[in-house]
Amino acid sequence: MLQAKHKTGLVFFPAFDWAISPTHPEREERLLYTQDQVFEEGLLDIEGIIEFKPDIVTVEDVQRVHFCVPDEHHVMTESHLISAGGAKKIGKAVLSGQVERGFALVRPPGHHAMRVVHGARGFCNINIEAIMIEYLRKAYGIRKVAIVDTDCHHGDGTQDIYWHDPNTLFISLHQDGRTLYPGSGFPEDLGGPNAVGTTLNIPLPPFTSEEGFLYAIRNAVLPILSEFKPDIIINSAGQDNHFTDPITNMNFSAQGYAELTSLLKPDIAVLEGGYSIEGALPYVNVGIILAMAGMDFSKVTEPNYDPKRIRQTAEVSRLIEQTCGQVLDNWNNRQTLREQQQDASGFSRETRSIFYDTDNLVETRLETVRNCPDCGGALKIDSSSDKGYHVLAIHIPLHACTNCRETGYQWFESGDLNQYDMVLLQDRTTDKYIKKV
Amino acid sequence: MIIGLDVGGTHTDVVLFGTAGLLKEIKVPTNHSNLFDTVLTGFEKITENINPQDIQRVVLSTTLTTNAIVQDKIPDVGMIVSGGPGIDPENFRTHSNYYCVSGSIDHRGREIRPIDKDEIQSVAARLKAQGIRHVGVVGKFSVRNPIHETKINRIIRDDFEKVFLGHQISGNLNFPRRIATTFLNATVYPIHREFYLAVEKSLRKKGLQVPIHILKADGGTMCFEASLDAPGQTILSGPAASIMGAISFAAPKKETLVLDIGGTTTDMGILLDRVPVLEPLGIQIGRYKTLIRSLKTHSIGLGGDSAVRVVNGRLQIGPDRDGPAMAYGGAVPTPTDALVALNIFKGGDRVRALEGLQTISSKLHIGVEDLARQIFDQACFKILGEARRLVDEINSKPVYTVHELQEGYRVNPENILVLGGPAPYFAEQLKHMSGLGVDVVPKWEVANAIGAALARTTCEVTLFADTEQEIATAPEENFTEMVGKHFSRQDAVNKTFELLRNKALQMGACDEDLEMEVIENLQFNMVRGFYTTGRNLRIKAQVKPGLIHEYKEIAGGLYMNGSPPEQT
């Protein structure tokens, strides 16, 4: 009789009645063959693998993370609330001790959704991992969280949400941004002035195979995680690094994903991208589920798997070693780098322009963060989109110091409705979301 | 006239049913070591003074295959399993003569690796050398493409008496369950065949020429000939008989919990608008999770004759039965003795019942009456608690569409129907403790046998079409057809109904009982690159479990000549 070594929870929500558009990669068919493979392998019958029905997240759950413009219902559908609810359900099952680990096999994905949401970008509307994490922080009082994003695309949404948070370590491994959407995620991007070093990017050259991914995990990710000592580890488990993926250029495999999972030992994995719906997803997901459960995955291979044919070149290996070295140096020097970045005026400012490819709009942002040695710092975002909305959004972090809290409220009170369509305040210290229109 | 026979843990119930209603009912004690004798005695008693020519139908529900599996009294068979990549099929080993062979098929039914003829022949030779006569052959994804199973069958079929192929069991995906189910079919086959041939022979001798129908776990019947290809479907038909016996008395449009409180066990199930809830994949028996279609039922070792003891200073009822109640000459006190002591049930020897309870009440330092009350309350509490678990389990079943999740339909029974020997004596207390409406099924003592007698033939068909590959298949039915690119969802439903109708008639159904419905209807656009290249269709249809047409009204009319008993 098969038995899971680690009691593992699974939410499987393929949203068989939802698509961005009929021929879009993010369509009804995406998890169809994965379902067939998971069912045929009998994974849900294994002793110690438990399937849960997803929750539906509330507007309050979303408001803990996002500023939705003009409001939540305009930028998402029911399917997003269920997808995030699937992650939330798994998070609850793990932290309440019902299961040891969990995997939310859900769609639509979320890791390109940033703190301010004007629409969909990179097939994502709301950030399902962040919504889960902030719920878990509130409900279970966890503090330090590590997110390892192994989707082929840079997790720029998650990076944006945790850019100023020294309690959240975000590490993204992805195909080099010079060769793939969204074009960001370089080793020198290390987080805001109060959180330098808790954002880490490991871009990998095109055609990286098992060897390169596992090298980066063993030599960069694992040592950093063991030093950071998170309360929980989340894996944003995108599956588009696969050698058959139609929209990327990597050479990863089901064996590689399963091995990565058993090295990383995430408490919670959440499905992100992955669009090789027949050749990769059925096998990769079975591999990940078995690895999460601590079971033998050595025979889970794609029909056309040939490790020799997809092996990376010596040049790719050399580039990866070099990048990992640079990432480790930055991590080790994070204190010094933090001091250098603090602006003498007491506030740091940054202007950005963000393109929403899925909804075809452009957002312009001016961010101001209070330099703070005691917390993540009060954050003010002046955001406007070419769709017409202009908002002022203020974020007071969960463990904000008194000064940052006061600064946040001053910003909110002086926010002028003649200048903005709305002024929003996310006060995480009291779990409140206030809207001034 | 129809004869219904239901073998229970304590008694075997037999009824004779005609257009005028229930004509005759008898009970014979079940002899588990000689079921054939029990069944035959039942037939003899029910047909006394009856003209055999008047009998049109005989339906049996027995514990034959269930007992064989639970007691592991099953003959050796061979299993040939072709897995391919994924979980190592060695993990699903059923017994020693289990061979994993090469070959693999992918999730869309495409051949990835062929089978190896020499390898199959050498396995067959080894099985044959050991005198094995029945073999199961199972491939991963054989319900998408059965080619490997049928090829292996062709290679070995001349060497064995019967070969069972995995894809013929069910259209559902689940390789480990397909293996377990095929194994069970192969192992119970000889016992099942021998038993029913003997029953048929004895009935012939009495002049009964009618076909024998056998009750399945899904509350439907199949004829003896059809059962030879799937004898495993007869496993655990007992609880199904009880649910079918209650159907006529459930309120339309309401949700009803059915409780059959027997001597040894209490079986429970749920009716939604008089239709029983089915198990999503298949029944579990012992360590075997199967693809055997079944009603969603739950059985607990708690009945009128369950042994009552003190374990670690606490009162324990069941899960075993150790003979009859003390009031009826048994050696161990039971819930029935508690009912007798409380004067709820006036029967048996009350003095002996009190004596029996005294041995326990002295250990717990309470009065006999208090103890009797405690036993009764604890039994009702346990039954209702387990029923709640069953309902929770049905409600926690995952759904895979936004629509279904939003709808969030939850089962919440508002009525309870009780049947079984002690049913009327439990009704009042169950009503009091649950706050629900409780009714006793008329003829509660034999309602299960009536359920078996009047159950219609049921079956299920799964059709899978892939218009990119231009193919429609229902491997269970040996059906494969080339279809055009424009094969529509409606075409698929029509085809499924056609297959379902043929299958049901072959299993012994009558045309007027073919209440068919679609239970799954999915269509996916298949997009490769940026173009729609085809559609992937999945249709599942069933003949709903229910009662045979001509007797539906008559069964419901039972109230007229058998009103519920008085309550105390």
Image: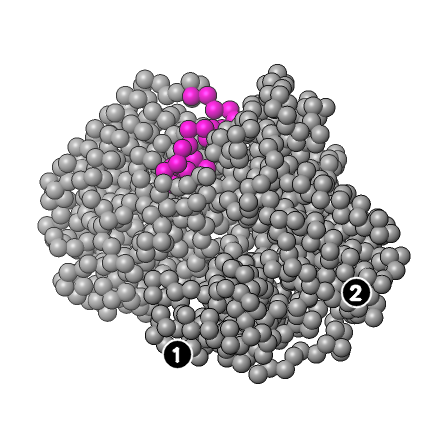
Q: Position of residue A204 (x, y in %)?
A: 33, 30
Q: Which range of residues does the magenta coloring cover?
A: A285-307
Residue at mark 1: B367
Q: Nearer the viewer, mark 2 or mark 1?
A: 1
Disc 2: host chain: B
Disc 1: host chain: B
Mark 2 neighbour density, 10 Å: few (under 14) some (14–19) many (20 or more): many
Secondary structure at badge 1 equals loop
Looking at the rendered structure, the kind of residue marked 2 is Phe
Q: Position of residue A156 (x, y in %)?
A: 33, 44
Q: Residue at x 51, y 41 (%)?
A: A42
Residue at mark 2: B17
Q: Residue at x 39, y 78 (%)?
A: B367
Visible residue check, residue B138: no
Magenta span: predominant SS is: loop
Q: Are marks 2 and 1 on the same chain?
A: yes
Secondary structure at badge 2 equals strand
Which of the marked residues, 2 or 1, is nearer the chain's N terminus? 2
Looking at the rendered structure, the kind of residue marked 1 is Gly
Instruction: Decide: is B303 above or below A325.
Output: below
**Label disc, if present, on residue B113 of the rendered structure:** none
Instruction: Work out how far the residue at label 2 is from the one at label 1, CA to CA, in angstroms.
Output: 47 Å
| Quarter holding residue B158 | top right
| Quarter holding residue B263 | bottom right
Q: Is residue B282 magenta?
A: no
